[in-house]
Image (tube, coloured by chain):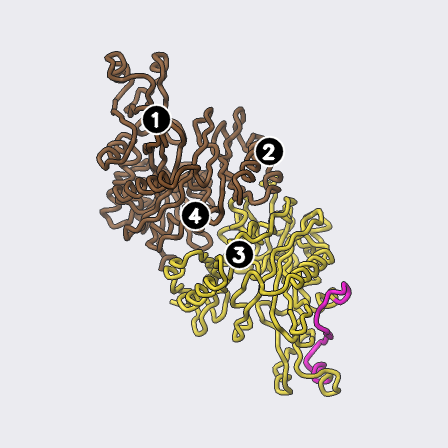
Chain colours: A yellow, B brown
Amino acid sequence: MFHEIKLGVLGAGQLGKMLAEAASPWSFRLYGLDPDPHAPARDLYCSFTCGDFRDFQTVLDFGRKMDIITIEIEHVNTEALEILEKEGVQVHPCSKAITTIKDKGLQKEFYKNQNIPTSPFILIDNRKEIITLVHSGQLEFPFVQKSRTAGYDGKGVKIISTPEDLLEAFDTPSIIEQKANIDKELAIIVSRNIKGETASFPVVEMLFNEKANLVENLLFPANISEDIKIQCQQIATKIINGLDMCGILAVEFFLQKDGSLWVNESAPRPHNSGHYTIEACTTSQYQQHLRAILGLPLGNTSAIVPYSMMINILGEDGYSGLPHYEGISEVLEIESTFLHIYGKKETKPYRKMGHINIIGSSLDSIQKKAIIISEKFKVTSK
Amino acid sequence: MFHEIKLGVLGAGQLGKMLAEAASPWSFRLYGLDPDPHAPARDLYCSFTCGDFRDFQTVLDFGRKMDIITIEIEHVNTEALEILEKEGVQVHPCSKAITTIKDKGLQKEFYKNQNIPTSPFILIDNRKEIITLVHSGQLEFPFVQKSRTAGYDGKGVKIISTPEDLLEAFDTPSIIEQKANIDKELAIIVSRNIKGETASFPVVEMLFNEKANLVENLLFPANISEDIKIQCQQIATKIINGLDMCGILAVEFFLQKDGSLWVNESAPRPHNSGHYTIEACTTSQYQQHLRAILGLPLGNTSAIVPYSMMINILGEDGYSGLPHYEGISEVLEIESTFLHIYGKKETKPYRKMGHINIIGSSLDSIQKKAIIISEKFKVTSK
């Protein structure tokens, strides 16, 4: 009986919150672990353990009380997860997949070994190595440096275009990769259950906030050819099969100006690029993740509306502290608009504080709504 | 700031649970009061008080800590609510509306005074009065007896067709009403905010389980003429305006074989007949109730799919105790089907244990799915 399954989640951020919200209509409740005592999902979990999911013993102790362990962040202690797997706890995604993904170096090598298209890269250990490579002519500007383990949400990524930029380079183990000649950035969520069955959601297009290096808006459907859509689906399916994981995987792509696709990176969990599925698809990415890891049939992934846009709500620049949400009434006045506030205790500049989904029957109408929302809705502080 | 509003809910049943689920994406949380320590909404409220919402002092004490009070059941202590209103607590729906509705005698008199079409009726105090009326020829078989205050979910209603049935009549203050010549039973949810603006959801058709005297399935759209739909909307709007209440109101109708409409009864709160709105409409009845009582704009009430069916999941006859849900995987395998389990601690014969919504583009496809669901999904006990 699935109500008796104890499902533990490493992390209690907004992704954990929305996972708990997807489980609630089934009266299925989750157990959570997070170092932040005010984490957004805290009150939605039936039990919350305040502790560090990067700590070996903490994860081991937490996991031993669970039947299934999942994650809402990949920066967790995978050594503990390996032991839990040996002890018979189901870990979805498996520790091996998390280990591969959370180190961007291993992730790139995985793509290379699996013949997944991605930008050419080299692995380096420190800044000095980069400087040596540049001076010896083996590395040419511009290129991209990504810290192997540091970041997400655009942190830990630098574009290095000039000798001056080298001074700003990270002095940590990194990947150095060729800068893509980007036409569009795309993303897809693919799911895989215990039986190895897969199902992919529609491809979406990401629109960036340059200043924050964060996805600002996300558009469904991506304005690309059917052929590119199929390629995205095939590549994402190849990755999730290659990782031999259960759950959902988000894959981000660069569609280059020459029409070729490069995988940028993947995340083996619910992802920002799948938020639109909550209102736009038959099954949300969150419910799909639950279906996959609980051994239930995968849900239908098709959209129920012709168009959807997701607008990330980022903390306004210049404001920190207790959040103040401006424009709630104005947003709720706009038809077919869905407000998601993560309930974070504090806002910071560009912090993800929520998102707004819009659904509609024409691109024009949702774009107009998106403009109004961007103007009216702001997270400042008290 | 609406996040600081303390909203207290009298009751923590499935309607409270779904209200909390609707509030969760906004990171808005509710305070609840219910006598059942295992009530379904308990863990979804940010604070739960175990106490009787029929008790004057309990409601008064609970309400004094709140900014707004709402209900998920109308059988609450309205004397306490009246005092709370005088003390400045917002009570939605207002105590006067609840008082009118919760006594079916007052409710019928309200309809009569407002020229709302409803079955002819008389008020009686005990069984003896009924017998006297029958013997004197003032009352003819068949007729319907409804206890003024006892029941909901089909309890407290008797159809009296023969002298023998008289022995089974309730010996309590009741209404005696003419039996409708029913073609269809219809329902509509209408909403009204603090400004007096109203919005009505689509009309639905109810299909009954004769044995349990409970709505078994519910179909959107009702298979009726546009004219009848408009009449339903107009009557429901007249009732909510007449009650001068804020929140949502469910109105149940008898469409008679001669084409005339009679109001059967109303409920000033989220209602079984509005469950389909969770997945079938832009705004759910629950979110609409929150919008109305929190002073937010009313949401768009239109359906986003051509057809929807709601199937009540009732506890199987012959089973009591800890519930066992049979057929979860089978139901989740059926496309565009949404499982709602209320998380009640115990099942009983015909107890409402959950519901399943189906959405689709053809009536035929959802009817086929409904048949499979009815066959596969059962709540038994362990």
Nearer mark to the viewer, of 3 and 2: 3
Do the dots labelled 2 and 4 sit on one chain? Answer: yes
Name the residue located 44 percent from the left edge and 70 percent from the top edge.
A316
- Give the left or right position of residue A149, taking residue A304 as reference: right
Report which residue position mark 3 lands on: A306
Residue B136's place in the image compared with A64, above or below, is: above
Q: Are the residues tagged 3 and 4 within 8 Å (C-beta)?
A: no
Instruction: Determine the CA span between mark 3 and mark 1.
Output: 44 Å
Report which residue position mark 1 lands on: B180
Report which residue position mark 4 lands on: B284
Mark 1: few/some/many CA within 10 Å (<14, 14-19, 20+): some
Mark 4: few/some/many CA within 10 Å (<14, 14-19, 20+): many
Report which residue position mark 2 lands on: B376
Residue B343 visible to the viewer: no
As helix, strand or loop, the secondary structure at mark 1 comes to loop
Q: Which amino acid lies under the numbered mark 3 shown in the image of this protein? A: Pro
Q: Are the residues tagged 2 and 4 within 8 Å (C-beta)?
A: no
Instruction: Determine the CA span between mark 3 and mark 2.
Output: 33 Å
Do the dots labelled 3 and 1 sit on one chain? Answer: no
Quadrant position of the N terminus of chain A in the picture: top right
